[in-house]
Structures are given as C-alpha cells and as structure tokens.
Amino acid sequence: MGGQTGFGPVPVGEDGEPAFAADWEARVYALAAVLRQRGLFNSDELRDAIERLPPGQYLGASYYERWLGAIETLADEKGLA
Amino acid sequence: MTYQPGAVVRVRNTDPDHHTRMPRYVRGHTGEVVAVLGSWVLPDDNARGMARARVETCYAVRFSAADLWGSGTHMVTVDLWESYLDQP
C-alpha cells in the first residue's frame, strides 16, 4: 500500500466470488457512479479525496469505507451536503 | 508520443504537492517501456478540476522488483504518463 512494506499480501478472490462483501459496499459504489455521471466529481478527484483522508481514518478504514469518506469530503467541499 | 516499446526511461524524482499517479516506489528508478497505452487525461490536472486538463500518452513501464525494493525475482509493471518520464 502506497509502496510501503509490511501490509502483507493483497488477497485475490476466486473467479465467481461476489464483487462486494456487503450490500452497503455496492450502494457506496453505485452512489459514486451516479455522482460521477452527474458531474459532481471525476475519478481522479475521488482518488485524491481518498488520499486526503486523515491518516488515522485512512489506515483504519476498509476499501469502501475510504470511498464513502471521500464522497463525504467531496459532497461537503462542493456544497452538495 | 515520445517513447516506443523497448525504450529505457527514468521516472522523475519529484514530490508534487497534489494528487499524482506516479507511485513513490518508482520515482527515480529506471524501467523499460513495454506498451504504449494511448492518450489519457493527466490525473494530476484532472484531480484539481482543471478545465483544460492536459492529455498525454500513457505507457506501461516495467521495473525489476529487486531494483525497487532490494529483493524479489519478479517484474512490476506500472502505467505512467508522459510527463512522469525522462530519458535516463
């Protein structure tokens, strides 16, 4: 992660494994897709917002928790929320 | 497009104060272009919402893991935009 060592291997799922571990993850993914299509942000702004999460939040969050944190950041910054 | 497959390139050793898709672990390292991926918007500009974000050629560049991390026998391939690269 971030080119740093010590985080262990990245688990790779088997073919046919569900793409989402829980329903809320699919909802976060869909929310990001809709907001991107509506022009609230682009993919690079989303990546940037993920990287700008406070380090403690970033390191303690799962993949889609980071997406949700980034969506919240962008919605706030762009005056949606 | 500046580089062809087989070209040896060096990743610029910079530390931009904005989003970039130039991973720290390849900065300053030398690799080989293995594919030309076409023209793509530069993430560094696009992440800042620039109206006229630059569009650049993107390359798949292959590095030796041992060069990057001091151990390992495998190769690592990273997609890198034109302005991330220099001739060594």
Image (spheres, rainbow, N blue to C red):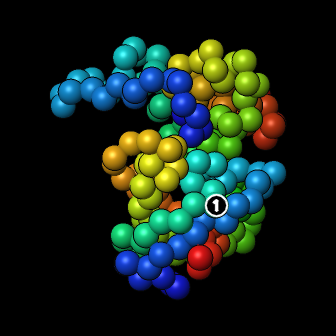
Residue B49, percent across and down? Answer: 73, 56
- Point out the image quarter for the N terminus of chain A: top right
Residue B18: percent from left, percent from top? 77, 51
Look at the image and tell me in which quarter the C terminus of chain A lies: top right
Q: Viewer-proximal residue, B81 or A31?
A: B81
Q: Position of residue B41 (x, y in %)?
A: 58, 66
Q: Relative to B14, is B23 on the left or the right? A: left
Q: Residue at x 53, y 19 (%)?
A: A62
Q: Nearer the viewer, residue B32 or A55?
A: B32
**Element carrying mark 1:** loop
Residue on which the image places disc 1? B28
Chain ID of residue with mark 1: B
User: Residue A55 is drawn in which quadrant?
Assistant: top right
Image quadrant assignment for residue A56: top right
Question: Which x, y percent locates residue B34?
Answer: 36, 70
Residue drawn at (36%, 53%) of the image? B75
Horizontal relation, residue A49 to residue B37: left or right: right
Residue type, mark 1 in image: Gly
